[in-house]
Every structure is written in structure tokens, then in C-alpha cells.
Amino acid sequence: MKYKHCILAILVISALILPNLSAVAAYAADDTVKLKLYWPLGKKSLQWRTLTKFMDGVEQTSKGRVKFKRFCCGSLGGDMEGIEQVRNGSIDMAAVGVGVYGAFHAPINMIVLPYVFKDYAHVYRFVSSPQWYELTKGLEKNGIRPIININAGFRDLVTTKKPVRTVADLKGLKIKVGRVKPWVTLWSTYGAVPAPLEVTEHYMAMKTGVVDGIEMPPNNVYVSKVCEVSKYYSDIKVAWIGPMVSMNLKRWNSLPKDLQGIIMAEAKKASKWGFEEGEKQNNDALKIMKKKFGLVEVENVDLEDFKKEAAKAYEVYKKESWYNQSVVDMMRSM
């Protein structure tokens, strides 16, 4: 009798375990995780080069268990469309402007406030820290898993009508800004007329006179060809920008732990490279634009004037529910 019970127990346990073991074996041997990743701008950008290092690194380190289908160049829309497609699962991953995520988790707005960061090393210390994840993890309530920030650069200004040296020069100028509320507040404080547009609309907006200027890093000005329809460049470094790489949360949770680890490790490697390379890329882009397209670098820009007037925008930010002075102080201190 005991013998029969033992046999029965063995059969029951086998029935429970063997299918799972066979599924694991089949996954390891045959299944490839295919991930769709989207970047809205061009392939010559610092950001795409960083993303390429990330995707290549994941594919190589995973020994082919992960393969990326790569989309770029406005093929799937602008920043907001990219985020929405990650949320609904039509694509797995996107890299779009970090400030745009503030529409889904407002405290992220603090990352893109004016004159928080001093240089690339300063930004990297923050975006590679646990504090960055604490600030961004609220996205998970919207089905978005933050992965990492990569570098674009600091937002400078290109204009068509006149050079901008001081805040007073901005009065009445229509300046393209991202669809990010703190930037609208800042440029309104500066006396400009902010025009929130998608990144895919930059060139035509400048060419047709919809806007008189755009604030973005030199590499982005060059890659988007905005330099062809701009005349003046003002080095004001008003805020740092960089895409956040994010992933559909359900898709992330479906991955084996070892693949999650590979994705995070390769994301950190690529991000570090982008921050180390960023200053050179932006400086090189500016040199090319000056030489090839006649872009005029404005001399004697009064940076302290821009910083002083930006402080007035902070009086508006402090009234917002998402603003936390201790978080801003923490970012600045890093």
C-alpha cells in the first residue's frame, strides 16, 4: 500500500515539474526575445549612437537571446507618440526627451529645470544614482518601466532674426520649446513667446517662420538640419536634456531576471559612453555648422543675466505640487 502511494506521489510531482522543465529548456534553446525600440530623431545623433551601443551590447552579451528591431527618424511619430506606444505595448522600448515623461509623472519635471546641473559629469552622477530611480519610478503606475537616461547635451539657442546676448533680446521672439510645462514657464519669464512643438517639427517651423528660435544642443541642431535655416547661435546652456530609455512594464516583468540584468548593465555602459563623448560631439557639431553653414556664434553672451532671470521662474515652480526643494537641492549638490 505504501509502495503504491509512493508511486502515485512520484507521478503527481512529475506531472507538475516536467512540463515546466521542458518549457525552460525550450526557451533556452529556441526562443529569442524580440524587442522594438524607437528613437524619434536621426541616426547621426549622439543619442542614436548611444542607443546603438546599448542594443548591440545587449545582443552580444545575451548571445543572441535578445534581438532588437530598430526604429528612428520620425517613423513612429514624436516624443509623446513614442511614450504612448510603449504604454499600450505596440512597441517595447522608446528613448524620448526626459521632460516629456513629466506628463505622466510630474516630479520628473525637476530634472529639466534651468541651471540645476553644472556639466556633463554632474548630470551623470545623478542619472546613474539610486536617487534617479526613486524620482522616476512613479512612471510604473502608468505602465512604464524607466531604464536609464542617456545624454543629449545642454540646451543652447539658435535664432533667425537677431543675435541673443541678454534676456532683453528675447522679448517678443517666438521660441520653440518641448512640450514640457517648466520650459514654457521659463521662456515666458524671459519675455519670449514659447511655442511647444514636437522634435519632428523643428526644421519646418524655423524654415517657415512659425518660430524665430529653437533651444536645443548643437548636435541636435546639426542632425535635425535646423542649422540650414538658422543664423545665430547663443551658448546659454539653460538646462540639460537627454532621452530617457523606457520599457513597457508588462514586457519588462515578462523577461527572465538574467536578461533584465543584461539590459540594465548594457544601458549603464552605453549611458556612460554618451556622457563621456557628449561634450566633444556637441563642440564638433558647432564647428561644422559655423564652417559649413555660416552659423554665427554670438559673442559676449551674458550668462549671469539668464541665470538671474531664471530665478524668477523658480518662484512659479515652487507653487507646483510636483516641486520639491530638497530634491532640487540634492540634484544640485551631486
Image (tube, rainbow, N blue to C red):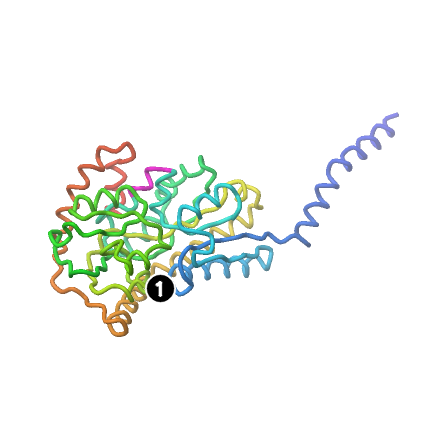
Q: Quadrant of residue 210?
A: bottom left
Q: Nearer the viewer, residue 55 or 293?
A: 293
Q: Residue at x 47, y 38 (%)?
A: 143
Q: Amino acid at mark 1?
A: Val
Q: Residue at x 41, y 39 (%)?
A: 137
Which is more toward the observer, 87 or 64? 87
> As drawn, which residue projects farthest toward the bottom?
291
Where in the figure is residue 248, as x and y percent of width and height?
A: 50, 43
- Give x and y (percent) for residue 103: 36, 39
Q: Is residue 107 above or below residue 294?
A: above
Left or right: residue 325 versus residue 71 is left
- Pointer 1 residue: 223
Over which residues does the magenta segment extend?
Answer: 105-110
Question: Relative to 175, is 327 above or below?
Answer: above
Left or right of 284 on screen, residue 146: right
Question: How dense is the environment of label 1, judged by Cα within 10 Å: few (below 14), some, or many (20 and up)?
Answer: some
User: Does dot 1 land on a helix, a strand or a loop?
Assistant: helix
Residue 65 horizontal side relative to residue 217, left or right: right
At horizontal 28% and vertical 62% (from top left) the residue drawn is 218
Quadrant where the image shows the N terminus = top right
Q: Which residue lies most toward the top here?
A: 1
Q: Provide residue 15's location: percent of width, then percent of height.
A: 77, 36
- For the image, the number of numbered tags is 1
Question: What's the magenta bit mostly, secondary-structure-wise?
Answer: helix
Residue 109 drawn in magenta? yes
Q: Which residue does the image show at 18% across and 60% down from the upper left? A: 161
Residue 179 appears at what percent x and percent y? 32, 45
Residue 107: quarter of image: top left
